[in-house]
Amino acid sequence: MTDVLIGQSYYLRFDAKLWEAMQPYPPLGSLYAAAYLRSQQYDVAFFDAMLADSEAPWGEAIDRTKPRFAVLYEDNFNYLSKMCLLRMRDAAFRMIELARERGTTVIVAGSDATDHAEQYLAKGAHFVVRGEGEHTVGELLHCLTGRSDATLDSILGLTFRREAQGDGIVRTPPRPDIRDLDSLPFPAWDLVDMVRYRDIWLNRHGYYSMNMVTTRGCPYHCNWCAKPIWGQRYNSRSPENVVEELYWLKRTYAPDHIWFVDDIMGLKPRWIDRFAELVDAHDARVPFKSLHRVDLLLRGDTVGSLKRAGARTVWVGAESGSQKILDAMDKGTKVEQIYAATERLHQAEIEVGFFLQFGYPGESREDIERTLQMVRDCRPDDIGMSVSYPLPGTKFHETVKQELGGQQNWVDSNDLAMMYHGPFTTEFYRQLHIVLHKEFRMRRGWSEVYRTMRHPTRLRRHHARRLVASLFHLATLPAARRKLQQLAGLSHGAPPPLVADTR
């Protein structure tokens, strides 16, 4: 028998948009939990839902490993787990059911379970871990296996049903965060089928990317950003500890690329500078992408240090080209900082990605146009679009909760449903997504082909495909814009347009 089987309920197969993109990363948070429990002398097996076809292999893994405890430990570094997609919640419920059918004790940890512990208990989970989970799960297992004399009531960050009280729910006080992140063991990469991940990346994209994290949490106050795990707190690994892991990954798995999945990488002053120094000193450089705030990128020579450390792509939470909307979001940044940071990154030959958010209360067509114009002016190398998403625990959610209907989560990442009575309808924002990407891909395609034609020897077949795609977007963009304009006249709850009686 195995002591613990760790899994998670994020299945790439259940998200058509991301399955098509096929850029899979192992569940980093779950691997940290596995490594920590092994450091506590538990025998740990691992089930990776990311590349599984359905929930059925989870049941097969339980049959094979016969664990005393099944732990659904969601990857808190995956922003889609924080969004709590309905398809993944249903998968978690099914996985709980499969474990209960086999008589296994079920422990659940993650953003959605933290926000909705009672639902997970109702579906059969024995315990829900709220917040950061490594130490809580470890103490819980010590209690359940008799390694400690602690009582369930004394374990911080735990929710469970006291059977002696029928439906009585016990919620112990929250657990303080782990401040010394260097004390944690590196993720248990040996439990993952790394060959399969590598083959997928090489076959689909021509390079192999792995994921790392240098921080936990975010101290900023964007009022739409849910923070069920770390709240407003922010803790960072030391540059020395990060470079030690980066060097080990480079030597062990030889990735061509790293994705640092931090909410904000290098927030502490001089952290990026020291990181760059150590990367160079230890020959640990691997090209990477990371997420940053535009105001922090303008501090000192942060961009130069990122370049020296190996930054290939920097994503920023631009959100909007309207200062009115940024202020309403409590974003704490200025539109001109977006322009300045983008220019500085491009001068350093670092690619720039924009996260854009539409649909915030009070947004007008003029605000939307300012955002579109910002994209035209700044010419980012990639964009991602979302619409404002009310999640429990946020100021934004409190503002609009009276307008929320039956659907309060997206089904998958391509949903884009407006779940409150926003400025425009769901159909408008879905069409805006089409218009934005058509215009962006048309301009990006033209720019790439133009640059390449200046060096004819570099022309390849894919450049011809890009040119054809640009011409297609150019031809179809006017009709897409007309449809967007028509949808702009509709509002939530408005009656359908009148149809003339031709009888």
Image (cartoon, rainbow, N blue to C red):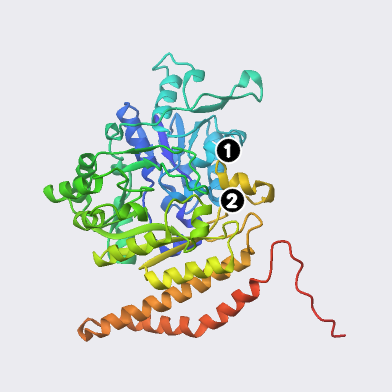
| Residue at mark 1 | 116
Disc 1 crowd, CA 10 A, few/some/many (<14, 14-19, 20+): some
Task: Reply above or below: 325 against 61.
Answer: below
Q: Identify residue type, mark 1.
A: His
Q: Identify residue type, mark 2.
A: Asn
Q: Residue at x 65, y 19 (%)?
A: 165
Q: Residue at x 52, y 24 (%)?
A: 172
- Judged left or right of residue 423, residue 257 is left
174 or 67, nearer to the observer: 174
Quarter of the picture containing the N terminus is top left
What is the total number of numbered labels drawn onto the structure image? 2
Disc 2 crowd, CA 10 A, few/some/many (<14, 14-19, 20+): many
Q: CA distance from mark 2 to mark 1?
A: 12 Å
Is label 2 in a helix, a strand or a loop?
loop
403 or 407, nearer to the observer: 403
Q: Position of residue 105 (x, y in %)?
A: 50, 29
Label number found at residue 351? none
Is label 1 in a helix, a strand or a loop?
loop
| Residue at mark 2 | 409
Q: Position of residue 477 (x, y in %)?
A: 51, 80
Q: Position of residue 423 (x, y in %)?
A: 63, 61
Q: Residue at x 49, y 71 (%)?
A: 436
